[in-house]
Image: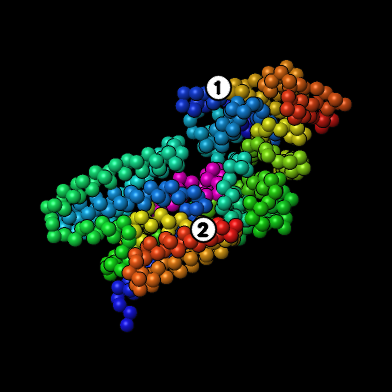
Amino acid sequence: MIPEYIIRAILASITVSVLLGLLSPIINMKGLAFLTHATFHSLLFGAVLGMVFGLILENLSLVMVVALIVTIIVVVLIAELEKKGFSSDSAVGIVASFVAGLTVLSFGVLYKVMATRPYFPLSEDIVSYLTGEIFLITLNDLLTLVIGGMVAFFIMLLLYRDFLYLSFDPEGLESYGGNSRAYLMILYVLVGGVGALIVKTVGLITLQVVAVLPGAIALMMSSDIRKILGVSLFLTLGVELSSVVLAYFTSIPPSGLATIMLGVIYGALLFRR
Amino acid sequence: MNAVEAENLTVLYGEQPALEGLTFNVEEGETMLLLGPNGAGKTTLLRTIAAFHGEYSGKLLVFGEPPYKARDIISYVPQSHSLNERVPLTAIEVVAMGSIYRGSFLHFRIPTSAMNKAKEVLGFVGLAGRENRLFRELSGGQKQRVLLARALMSDPRLLLLDEPLSALDPSARVEVTAVLSKIKRERGLTMIITTHDINPLLEIGDRVMLINKRLIEFGKPEEVLRDDVVKSVYGPLARAVKVEGKLFCITGDAHIYHRREDM
């Protein structure tokens, strides 16, 4: 019989794969890798802040909520700076450096709060946000992931063509009556929201790679948008599921395995070129 | 009726003026060629008329309305190199983009009516049969024609074209100019075209406006493209000459600008 935690891990992998498989090509086409990087790092600040609140209020489910709120604030800030005329890279750089500083400060606060509650298993939680602990996700985590994932999936599905047009020619979209800023804001919030949803599963350290490489590989393999999406989805799914299976037998963290597999595939394709 | 009317139009980038005190008008159905050296403010002027720059001083009206109120009747054609060709859109998808955004936000599928119209407009610009080719795989001239088709999708009254001939080889320039000429002839649209390569466009230009942040000259091509004016803008090696009844402007880098007198 398959242990329940493996079933949870497989279901989480499928949800993560669908979300990242769809989002990854857009991240590549819109050139959002740097933004994704900064956004996902802001998740760490959100998670640490969430732990501080979680400890004080003795409710650790606050971690994901606070991480999500912080990430959304960060992407909105980046979008606002872009609106004021900063280039995307500058906006990300300004906000990311601010967030990095706040993260270090919040760790200091967290250690102080932890010292007052020595029996809380928090150190494990911090590690799970950094490296991803797909075998440790609870039923509640899975439910949040699936429900949140479905919302993100339907938003992506409904607006996918608009995101393509936004990536192709934002000024043209604006000039023909579309609202580029609204689409961009929704896309940024989606990137941040999906990151917050899956961070505990994939881990902050590897999240960037898993969010960027499937799309990059798919774009190298095809010029047809349907095939690109198909390759990205199946690649993410294949890598995520096989890393769970390998991790079960080898006790190596699955997120590390997934990242290495994607890196090898990407590198092999580059060499073949 | 004036399609565009500007009086003392000034646009600032920070504290630096990009345009200073421009006064001009473009009549309905007219094609105006906007000339000037790099950094003269040509693109800024187009983008201000297209309502991309909300902040300006002076008067600017498009068919009697401020630009932001006239957006539905303006089509802006950007320089094709400003597009992100990593996005694998087909020609017909790019063209359809021109009509689906008025009054709707979600576009899971492109409506059949928009696809049919896009097909028809692609035929108008001479690209029938290439609907499903990827935009990035088209030649420079074909890409420009796809962008023109997209601009026509919303049935605009004013077409703003930013360097439609830039980075095109001579035959592609002829292709694009022929389409512009067809648009002028068959649809009677008002067009404002910025260009460094006035050579083929003089055949369709009714008036020429020469700017360098400020208005330098404005009038019919033969009035504006005088030897002294051309030298003052393009440098001492530039010349305006008439050969066999045609007006030519020769710049130092041997670009030839001409206009047939018989047009």
Residue A82: name its quadrant. Answer: top left
Q: Name the residue under label 2.
A: A267
Please tell me whether residue A111 is drawn above or below residue B63 in the rendered image: below
Residue shown at the point (63%, 24%) measured from the top left: B211
Residue B20 in sight in this render: yes
Residue shown at the point (33%, 79%) measured from the top left: A2
Q: Quadrant of the C terminus of chain B?
A: top right
Report in which chain the residue with disc 1 lies.
B
Give the extent of the magenta segment: A166-191
Q: Percent position (x, y) of residue A101? A: 29, 42
The amino acid beneath tag 1 is Glu
As drawn, the label of residue B20 is 1
Residue A77 in sight in this render: no
The amino acid beneath tag 2 is Gly
Q: Is residue A46 magenta?
A: no
- Given residues A117 and B142, the one toward you in this image is A117
As drawn, the label of residue A216 is none
The secondary structure type at the circle numbered 2 is helix
Q: Residue furthest top?
A: B228
Q: Percent position (x, y) of residue B117? A: 65, 55
Q: What is the chief secondary structure element of the magenta stretch?
A: helix
How far apart, in angstroms, are the residues tagged by discs 1 and 2? 53 Å
Please tell me whether residue A165 is drawn above or below residue A120 in the rendered image: above
Residue shown at the point (66%, 53%) measured from the top left: B137
Q: In this view, does B23 lie to the left or right of A114?
A: right
